[in-house]
């Protein structure tokens, strides 16, 4: 007797003077047969048995720990350990403020197949709690890793945000020995640029340095690829991160400017920057030009300086259809002293920070950081002194974070150990001065 051990029979029928007709299993099925029969009488059947098909399932995977958390982004990912018997055609992470996010929520796309992958979660709101989990999809459906809950940062560089009293910014990373000033944070919060002022072999040097959050760690600061040869300072980041502006003494076409200091910029290109380009006329070429900053609509505020006399005033130029217009001098509410310089405008143009001195020079000259508020009719308030509020005599190279939430300003170490360090303070410190002066 022939043992019949398995499942569904497939009949092969034999008829006289006719070829055998078979109901053939698919190529995906495994087939087991009985021992060969030497001869088959007409009208009889031979039985074969089909092995069961392997059952397919959704992929099996895990979610990677969340790290490198900023105000608007975080690093995570996953590992697909089994494709469930069908090719993984999509994988990534999904996240939301709900406890069990799915692929109908925010997602990343991070390749196909099994193995580990890394994901950058973006578009987060500062201080908001989120749940993230990895996903992988095959022909059967979508599998998910375990959910992980995290909270978007409220500060920068992993620091707890300061209050209304300035605190040192990123000690050991940005604020180190030497002199640091002019902090510019890229909107994603994963790149921080700052100016380092040094005396190298008796030569004055100002270079732009950068540190990046790669994976879960900040890199050691290095000179930015576009800086290091010339004196580059007074950084300003466009609020949307598309451009970064700075003052430089690098050579310039004399048809554009015959002055030493002019405003330059670099354009965002992928994860890096273009080569430096002059902002051009009518901003450059009128005098030595310094202290650029821009609003969200591209309006530029800057300083025109007379190097010989030390006199300086603050101007602005509107950007219309991609072209900067003839600069306009700000009114006397802002330009009320002999030196009015190093301005930085709020992203929404609601106020302007600047440095002012009654006479020429910075030594033994009672100047400081001031703020003027833009009124609804476009006029400017009388400038108010910020020194009593922030408790600092320093004011040059002040900047504002892209979201308008923090001020960055240099502050000198009283002990003379670290020189000039970068500090930051909550921008609400400015609101206390919005009321009219008494």
Image: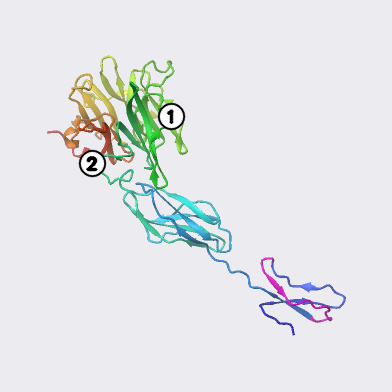
Rounded to the nearest angstrom, the CA distance separating label 1 from label 2 is: 34 Å
Q: Residue 300's image quarter?
A: top left
Q: Callout 2: helix, strand or loop?
A: helix
Report x, y in % for residue 275.
Answer: 46, 29
Report x, y in % for residue 73.
Answer: 39, 48
Q: Callout 1: helix, strand or loop?
A: loop
Position of residue 148 in the picture relative to residue 135 (left or right)? left
Report x, y in % for residue 70.
Answer: 36, 47
Specify the farthest residue to the left.
Answer: 438
Which dot marks residue 174? none
Which part of the image, by quadrant, shows the C terminus? top left
Give the labeled residue for mark 1: 226
Which part of the image, by quadrant, shows the N terminus? bottom right
Report x, y in % for residue 233.
Answer: 34, 27
Which of the two discs, 1 and 2, labels the residue nearer the N terminus?
Answer: 1
Residue drawn at x 37%, y 59% as measured from the top left: 98
Give the labeled residue for mark 2: 428
- Magenta highlight on residue 64: no
The reply to whether residue 189 is in sight is yes
Count of numbered tags: 2
Which stretch appears magenta? 27-44
């Amino acid at each position: 007797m022939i043992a019949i051990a398995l499942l569904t029979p497939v009949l092969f029928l034999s008829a006289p003077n006719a070829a055998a007709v078979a109901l053939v299993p698919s190529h995906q099925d495994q087939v087991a047969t009985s021992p060969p029969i030497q001869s088959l009488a007409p009208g009889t059947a031979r039985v074969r048995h089909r092995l069961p098909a392997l059952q397919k399932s959704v992929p099996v995977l895990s979610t990677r720990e969340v790290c490198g958390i900023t105000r608007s982004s975080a690093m995570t990912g996953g590992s697909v350990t089994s494709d469930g018997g069908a090719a993984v055609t999509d994988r990534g992470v999904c996240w939301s403020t709900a406890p069990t996010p799915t692929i109908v929520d925010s997602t990343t796309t991070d390749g196909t197949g099994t193995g580990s992958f890394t994901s950058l979660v973006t578009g987060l709101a500062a201080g908001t709690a989120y749940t993230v989990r990895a996903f992988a999809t095959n022909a059967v459906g979508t599998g998910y890793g375990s959910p992980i809950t995290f909270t978007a940062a409220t500060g920068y560089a992993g620091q707890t945000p300061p209050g209304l009293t300035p605190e040192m910014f990123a000690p050991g990373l940005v604020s180190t020995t030497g002199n640091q000033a002019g902090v510019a944070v890229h909107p994603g919060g994963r790149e921080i640029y700052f100016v380092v002022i040094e005396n190298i072999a008796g030569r004055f040097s100002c270079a732009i340095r950068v540190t990046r959050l790669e994976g879960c760690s900040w890199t050691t600061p290095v000179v930015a690829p576009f800086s290091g040869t010339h004196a580059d300072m007074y950084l300003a980041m466009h609020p949307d991160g598309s451009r970064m502006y700075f003052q430089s003494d690098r050579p310039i076409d004399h048809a554009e400017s015959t002055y030493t200091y002019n405003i330059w910029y670099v354009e965002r290109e992928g994860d890096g920057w273009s080569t430096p380009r002059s902002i051009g006329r009518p901003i450059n070429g009128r005098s030595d030009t310094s202290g650029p900053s821009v609003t969200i609509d591209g309006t530029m505020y800057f300083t025109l300086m007379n190097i010989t006399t030390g006199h300086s005033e603050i101007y602005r130029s509107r950007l219309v259809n991609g072209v900067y217009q003839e600069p306009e001098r700000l009114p006397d509410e802002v330009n009320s002293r002999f030196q009015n310089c190093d301005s930085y405008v709020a992203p929404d143009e609601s106020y302007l920070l600047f440095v002012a001195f009654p006479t020429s020079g910075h030594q033994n000259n009672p100047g400081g950081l001031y703020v003027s508020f833009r009124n609804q009719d476009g006029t400017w308030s009388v400038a108010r002194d910020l020194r009593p509020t922030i408790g600092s005599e320093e004011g040059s190279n002040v900047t504002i974070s892209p979201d308008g939430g923090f001020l960055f300003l240099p502050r000198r170490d009283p002990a003379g150990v670290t020189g000039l360090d970068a500090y930051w303070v909550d921008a609400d410190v400015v609101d206390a001065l919005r009321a009219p002066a008494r």
